[in-house]
């Protein structure tokens, strides 16, 4: 299979931005991702701040990726923006704060599509769905943004509020009824731990017009193995540069 065919079959999704080279879910990581012309999608994570602003951070607390402490929902969006969300990764990123979803939508407009994962462990899920969708609409990005979640009720609420934006279920399992569950939610996308990708699942997804993304594929050996598959699915990775090397048949590690 030639490089062009592989790239079309298995588009690159930058996981939390170019998180292998910059702190995850920061503007630096997103800028690095959109600077790569082969990155067609960026995946990111959203919680609500104290003042109900959708903010981009993975955990529901601040301890791992910022110099703050306690729950994300305990601080306003402005307070979150002033935290140091980069030094844990490298001191040169010390000026990176926690961005809002709106800021990322502005940055990526016309450059990259977004896979927005709504977390929902720490706040009212209906409110999270409503605020995220409101922000996406306000930025004119409903047509090129996908909302995903582990939480089926979040997806149900998004669908109640919009019959046009795409939605998808996130799982780390290989149950036989996955595709049926997705269709029952009014969704058309499956985000799945890449170890669960197999011929049977991909065939069922194709028959049901459900798109698939495998996460999170970081080694070049795994990327190479998956890129050789004939079925179409996205590859989500912290290292878009490794994805590109594999697609071009360059060195493996």
Image (spheres, helix red, strand yellow):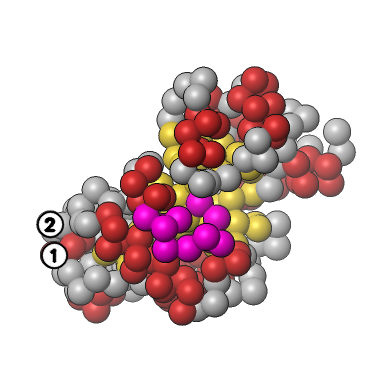
Residue 162 on the magenta span: yes
Q: Is residue 116 above or below residue 150?
A: below
| Residue 76 at least partly seen | yes
Mark drawn on residue 70:
2
**Image quarter in which the C terminus is found:** top right
Point out the residue furthest to the right here. 2
| 115 vs 241, nearest the viewer | 115
Q: Is residue 2 above or below residue 147?
A: above
Tell me, yes or no, whether the two marked residues, 1 and 2, touch with CB atoms within 8 Å: yes
User: What is the secondary structure assignment of the residue under circle 2?
Assistant: loop
The Cα–Cα distance between marks 1 and 2, rounded to whole angstroms, is 7 Å
Q: Quadrant of residue 170 in the image?
A: top left
Mark drawn on residue 192:
none
Answer left or right for 65 relative to 63: right
Residue 65: image x %, image y %?
Answer: 28, 55
Please give the residue where the numbered disc 1 appears in the rendered image. 74
Dot in front, 1 or 2: 1
State the residue at coordinates (41%, 58%): 160
State the residue at coordinates (40%, 50%): 156
**Image quarter in which the N terminus is found:** top right
Answer left or right for 247 relative to 159: right
The magenta region covers: 157-167
Q: Is residue 243 above or below residue 88?
A: above
Residue 127 on the magenta span: no
């Amino acid at each position: 299979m030639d490089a062009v065919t592989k790239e079309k079959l298995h588009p690159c999704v930058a996981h939390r931005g170019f998180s292998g080279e910059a702190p995850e879910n920061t503007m630096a990581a997103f800028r690095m991702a959109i600077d790569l012309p082969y990155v067609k999608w960026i995946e990111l994570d959203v919680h609500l701040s104290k003042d109900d602003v959708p903010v981009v951070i993975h955990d529901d607390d601040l301890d791992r990726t910022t110099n703050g402490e306690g729950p994300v929902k305990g601080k306003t969006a402005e307070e979150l923006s002033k935290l140091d969300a980069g030094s844990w990764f490298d001191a040169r990123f010390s000026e990176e704060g926690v961005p809002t979803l709106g800021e990322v939508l502005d940055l990526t407009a016309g450059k990259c599509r977004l896979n927005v994962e709504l977390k929902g462990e720490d706040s009212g899920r209906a409110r999270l769905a409503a605020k995220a969708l409101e922000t996406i609409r306000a930025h004119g990005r409903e047509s090129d943004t996908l909302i995903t979640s582990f939480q089926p009720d979040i997806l149900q609420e998004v669908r109640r509020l919009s019959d046009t934006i795409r939605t998808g279920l996130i799982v780390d399992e290989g149950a036989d009824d996955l595709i049926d569950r997705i269709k029952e939610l009014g969704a058309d996308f499956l985000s799945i731990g890449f170890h669960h990708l197999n011929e049977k699942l991909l065939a069922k997804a194709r028959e049901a017009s459900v798109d698939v993304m495998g996460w999170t594929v970081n080694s070049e050996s795994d990327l190479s193995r998956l890129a050789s598959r004939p079925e179409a699915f996205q590859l989500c990775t912290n290292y878009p540069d490794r994805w590109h090397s594999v697609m071009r048949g360059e060195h493996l590690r």
